[in-house]
Image: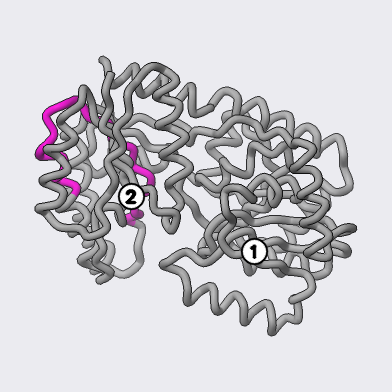
């Protein structure tokens, strides 16, 4: 089977790892994958042409994120222009098409005008999605939103975000970990890491408050600012300085893939103090390093937890609860090992390979 795979490999939006991992998994199952990159300059003509090009395959697989289809930054126009370009692409496809929707905006907005615009958008978006053979979402609440706004409930399928294979430390990586801890003056510290692009919804303020009085602990911010959150990033730097926490925080900026294992294996506990999140790719990357995770009890994490994912949960926005959850792991080796075991078992069941087999099944149906 030949698959036209529409995605974006721009590292600024964090999708290359997901896209390339899935493409590789599909190829291991015998498929031929032709990656079609989202154009840097967005226009109806470009998406019209890309749709025609994608037809030169047996099936189409589309990764949908709003920014893939619009470079307009005017808040009201951005989603609707994105939708228009997405609809143009779909209108050209004459082959079985599966779209993975990575984020769905909420209609629970207090401003009446914005709430009306959001609901109107979701109605149109769901109608356009109904042209697809199947619609994949990585969180059940996204499925609920789409179905409530008109998407065919039989087409919308919830599948947990796929996980890469468990990471295994080599002698080289162990040496790199030692050198990294030494260079960052972290040799005898407990490293608590928040991985991924810096964004306001990830709850860094909560983490700062939680660790401020934790002895011998350092917060590692393992990522640079998201392109839409540079103002927030500057505020975070100011907050760290104002609270005198420069010695308890390390910011690494963007982490090159070749350095990923070093940073991740250096971590003692991964923190996920998110206030909200879609089906988080950064959470999946953290999960394969055999480390305990502390996360806020938001729907994205709760859905995984209910299916067996290992994470110590605390209330969103509760710095005291986050601190207690961290201490519960630091002071309880049995609990720590239990969480790691649950996560390891979960990621084996939800690998990129199993997800690829599932996609090929529905593409061939």
Q: Is residue 119 in view from this perspective?
A: no
Is 287 placed left or right of 75 in the picture?
Answer: right
Q: From which residue to which does the magenta span run? A: 86-107
In percent of the image, x 16 and y 29: which residue is there? 56
Rendered residue at 28%/69% (across/down): 73
Q: Of 244 and 60, which appears nearest the observer? A: 60
Residue placed farthest to the front in the image? Answer: 172
The residue labelled by disc 1 is: 252
User: In the rendering, at what x and y percent does residue 121 appear?
Assistant: 21, 54
Residue 325 at x, y percent in the picture: 76, 51
Contact check, label 1 and label 2, Cβ < 8 Å? no
Callout 2: SS: loop
Classify residue 160 as left or right of residue 306: left
Q: Residues within 10 Å of mark 2 (few under 14, many from 20)?
A: some
Residue to which mark 2 is pinned: 65
109 in relation to 347, above or below: below
> Observer-nearest residue: 154 or 89?
89
In terms of sequence position, does the residue under pointer 1 or pointer 2 come before the other?
2
Q: Nearer the viewer, residue 9 or 297?
A: 9
The tally of labels here is 2
Tell me the mark number nearer the camera, choosing from 1 and 2. Answer: 1
Residue 3 in sight:
yes
- Residue at left offset 56%, top offset 41%: 284
> Does the magenta segment cover residue 98?
yes
Q: Is residue 268 above or below residue 235?
A: above
Instruction: From the viewer's side, name the closer residue of 218 and 8.
Output: 8
**Image quarter (top left, top right, bottom left or bottom right) of the C terminus:** top left
Whole-percent x, y for residue 6 in the image: 28, 40
Q: As drawn, is 199 to the left or to the right of 89?
A: right
């Amino acid at each position: 089977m030949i698959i036209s795979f529409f995605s974006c490999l721009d590292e600024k939006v964090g999708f290359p790892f997901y896209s390339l991992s899935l493409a590789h998994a599909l190829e291991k199952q015998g498929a031929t994958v032709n990656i079609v990159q989202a154009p840097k300059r967005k226009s109806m003509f470009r998406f019209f042409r890309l749709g025609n090009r994608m037809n030169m395959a047996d099936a189409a697989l589309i990764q949908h994120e709003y920014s893939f289809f619009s470079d307009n930054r005017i808040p009201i126009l951005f989603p609707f222009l994105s939708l228009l370009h997405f609809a143009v692409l779909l209108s050209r496809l004459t082959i079985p098409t599966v779209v993975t929707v990575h984020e769905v905006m909420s209609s629970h907005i207090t401003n009446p005008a914005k709430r009306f615009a959001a609901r109107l958008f979701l109605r149109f978006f769901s109608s356009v999605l109904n042209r697809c053979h199947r619609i994949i979402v990585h969180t059940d609440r996204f499925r609920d939103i789409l179905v409530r706004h008109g998407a065919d409930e039989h087409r919308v399928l919830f599948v947990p975000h796929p996980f890469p294979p468990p990471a295994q430390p080599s002698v080289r990586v162990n040496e790199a970990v030692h050198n990294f801890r030494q260079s960052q003056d972290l040799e005898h510290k407990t490293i608590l890491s928040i991985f991924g692009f810096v964004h306001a919804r990830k709850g860094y303020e909560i983490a700062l408050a939680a660790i401020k009085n934790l002895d011998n602990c350092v917060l590692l911010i393992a990522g640079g600012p998201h392109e839409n959150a540079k103002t927030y990033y500057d505020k975070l730097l100011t907050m760290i300085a104002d609270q005198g926490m420069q010695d308890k925080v390390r910011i690494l900026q963007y982490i090159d893939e070749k350095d990923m294992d070093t940073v991740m294996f250096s971590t003692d506990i991964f923190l996920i103090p998110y206030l909200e999140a879609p089906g988080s790719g950064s959470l999946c990357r953290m999960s394969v390093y055999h480390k305990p995770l502390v996360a806020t009890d938001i729907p994205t994490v709760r859905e995984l937890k209910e299916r067996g994912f290992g994470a110590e949960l605390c209330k969103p926005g509760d710095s005291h609860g986050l601190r207690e959850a961290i201490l519960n792991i630091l002071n309880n080796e049995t609990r720590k090992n239990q969480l790691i075991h649950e996560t390891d078992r979960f990621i084996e069941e939800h690998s990129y390979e199993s997800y690829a087999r599932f996609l090929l099944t529905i593409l061939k149906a």
